[in-house]
Amino acid sequence: MSSQVRNLIIGVVVIIVAVAAYFGITSKNKAQEEAEAKSQEIFAVDETVKEIHVSSNEEEGVFVKDGTNWVIVGKEYVELSQIDIDQAVAYVKNLTSVKDLGTNDKASYGIDEGVTFTIITESGSEYTVTVGDEILDGQGYYAYVPEYDNIYVIDSEAGKAIKKNISDYRDRNPEYVDYSQLEYMKITRQGKDTFTIVPNPDGEIEEGLGEYILTEGFPCEMPVLTDALAENIGGPVYEITAQSFIDDPESDESYGFDDPYMVIELKDALDLSCIITVGDPADDDTRYAKFSGKDYVCTVKNSKTDLIYNADLFSIIGKYYVNVPVTDMSSLTISTSDTVRTFTVDSENGKIFADNVETDIQSFSTLYGQLAQLTIDGRSESEKFGNEVLTIDITFSDGTEETIEFFDYDNNYYGSAINGEKITLTGKGMVDSFIESVKSY
């Protein structure tokens, strides 16, 4: 046999062996993957679930369907979070393991202290899982399946959805209001004030300012700082939820609702509304509360309600005295100790009149720019203001009026009053410069 023929035969044999090895390995890998996939599947239920049993060392109960909604047997009046129940059912119907521990040592994995969730299908088949401790790294939960007398690791999302006491499925939210279409938010704080916030019909004044307006609780309407509102009031209001429930409440007086700590009223453009009444302390961490449209009394976290109660309105408002374009005014009168200037705005024809004489638009714009830059620099600690140095009277196009007055206060600041309320301070430099511009106009 020639060397060429021998080499050809050897090459063919090598190829055949390689191909065989490839297919052998591929078949083995495929079989292994199928085996692993099969070991991960615990339940695969195609039937409709008609009943759910939930039990723990703390409580137990049964869910059944009333029409399209789940209800608690014996407590059919209780509102439930349907989506949470459906999610837990879906996880149990298609339960898979991340890892098979190959043990039934319940005590070591928190199974004895866990929550048992059983679904019963239309045919009467039962599927049960008990979810125990969460794994320390947050990668899953230990779960015991009686059918196989075995403990598995299931993924974190499944564990969180299933490991809930029956009361955890209660709807804990106040009545729904669409915050993106809020018509108003009104908050009354015991012994402090009442304030109202509404959307600005003209839209944001600038980014982060004026999307909402404070219309009650300050001497005049003021634009609101969006982030400060969200952090101190809007966010905490949205996060108020029931922590525990009293389904057979006593009188309002028993919980402090006759003289509430705080009342929060919300209404949206779809005419959906909600009232949250917050009463006396229930313990160190919660207060009693009731939600409009709900029959129960509940507790809510102090960490949310106290943020709202202690919110400083001064910290959420913009700090400019004038927040509108001159076209939103009909007249502006500026008075100093020895000068009075009255400007009339003819928006329709784009003209400005100073003391009834048409004035140069550019000159007025410069003066108005100075006025618009006057800022609230602080709050006055005393109403003992000195002599008045400047008064600004504004009549807006809609007929409303506003008066801003400045008075001697100390070496650095003038005290200011808005519509007669002496509450703010402004640095002397900006005010003095504006007074000089008025006098020389």
Image (cartoon, rainbow, N blue to C red):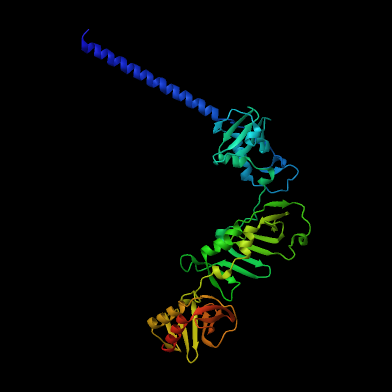
User: Which sits in the foreground, 120 or 406?
Assistant: 406
Question: In screen coordinates, is 248 left or right of 353?
Answer: right
In this orientation, does residue 206 appear?
yes
What is the quadrant of residue 365 in the picture? bottom left
Residue 377 picture location, percent across and down: 51, 75
User: Which sits in the foreground, 269 or 30?
Assistant: 30
Question: Furthest-right residue in view?
Answer: 250
- Rendered residue at 67%/48% (across/down): 170
What is the quadrant of residue 164 in the picture? top right
Question: Furthest-top residue in view?
Answer: 1
- Rendered residue at 39%/21% (across/down): 23
Residue 342 picture location, percent across and down: 48, 87
- Rendered residue at 53%/64% (across/down): 228
- Rendered residue at 46%/77% (across/down): 372
Question: In screen coordinates, is 248 left or right of 330?
Answer: right
Quarter of the image with the N terminus is: top left
| 144 shown above or below 77 | above
| 69 shown above or below 272 | above
